[in-house]
Amino acid sequence: MVYPTFGGYGLYLLFSLPALLLGFWAQMKVRSAFNKYSRTRSYAGLSGAQIARRMLDSYGLHNVRVEQVGGFLSDHYDPANKVLRLSPATYNSPSLAAAGVAAHEAGHALQDEKGYFMLQVRTAMVPTVQIGSWIGPIIFMIGLFMASTIGTQIAWLGLILFSASALFAVVTLPVEFDATRRAKAWLASSGVIYQQEMGGINSVLDAAALTYVAGAIQAISTILYYVFLLSGRRRD
């Protein structure tokens, strides 16, 4: 049987450290870009809420509400209730950062309206991911510490449950990239943002996209580490 040891933790770092460093760098880029362009007022002076409302209305999505929600960068679209929720830093601000984030979230509402397949897949996965993300690792560790074939089978079950989180992170990538593409296209053509301001919009949205890439790589690296542990146990 394979027991986690200091060497095991060292092996875990070997698998996870590159992804962790990428995630840290991505978060730094997001905060840097958001802090910089949250202080840069757009020429039109529209708040994030106004930007979102205009984009939604331009596509006929008058039924989608725009609401303020607490938190920092807690912006998201709720497809179940058709509500676009923006953090205070986005909802009230006339900055380029707010414009980019608001348009990105409105892009998700447009995906929902158009029946974008990958968004439907991601939404359907949410209940499974909520269960698997916390109970999967627990089941895996229980099985890993059991010195029997049954223990190995339990560990594999935990790994399968946790794998839903990694799959969710991968499915999220095209959803986020597509929402960003829609946001950039609308902002560039709608007249609410001048062409010379698009550099700031791109910096904010591209940095945000990098965080999703880092998240997917982190999830996959953890899965690979778990598989390595179980494969080593089987050889023993």
Image (cartoon, rainbow, N blue to C red):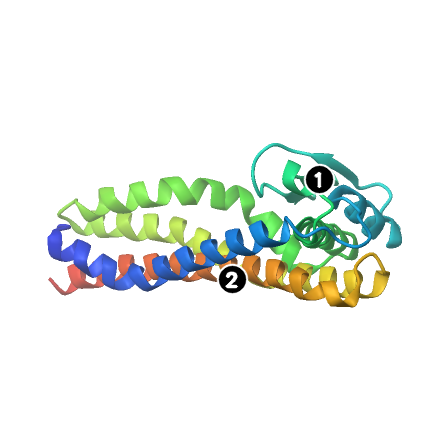
Q: Is residue 171 left or right of residue 136?
A: right
Q: Residues within 10 Å of mark 2 (few under 14, many from 20)?
A: many
- Residue 150: percent from left, percent from top: 21, 48
Q: Which mark is residue 210?
A: 2
Q: Is residue 53 left or right of residue 146?
A: right
Q: Residue furthest top?
A: 70
Q: Is residue 25 visible?
A: yes
- Residue 18: percent from left, percent from top: 33, 64
Q: Amino acid at mark 1?
A: Tyr
Name which residue lies at 30% across and 59% down. 16
Indicate the quadrant where residue 224 lies: bottom left
Measure the alpha-carbon separation of dots 2 and 1: 23 Å
Q: Which residue is mark 1?
A: 91
Q: Residues within 10 Å of mark 1 (few under 14, many from 20)?
A: many
Q: Given contact means CB atoms under 8 Å apart, are the residues at marks 2 and 1 in contact?
A: no
Name which residue lies at 71% across and 40% down. 91
Frontmost of labels 2 and 1 is 1
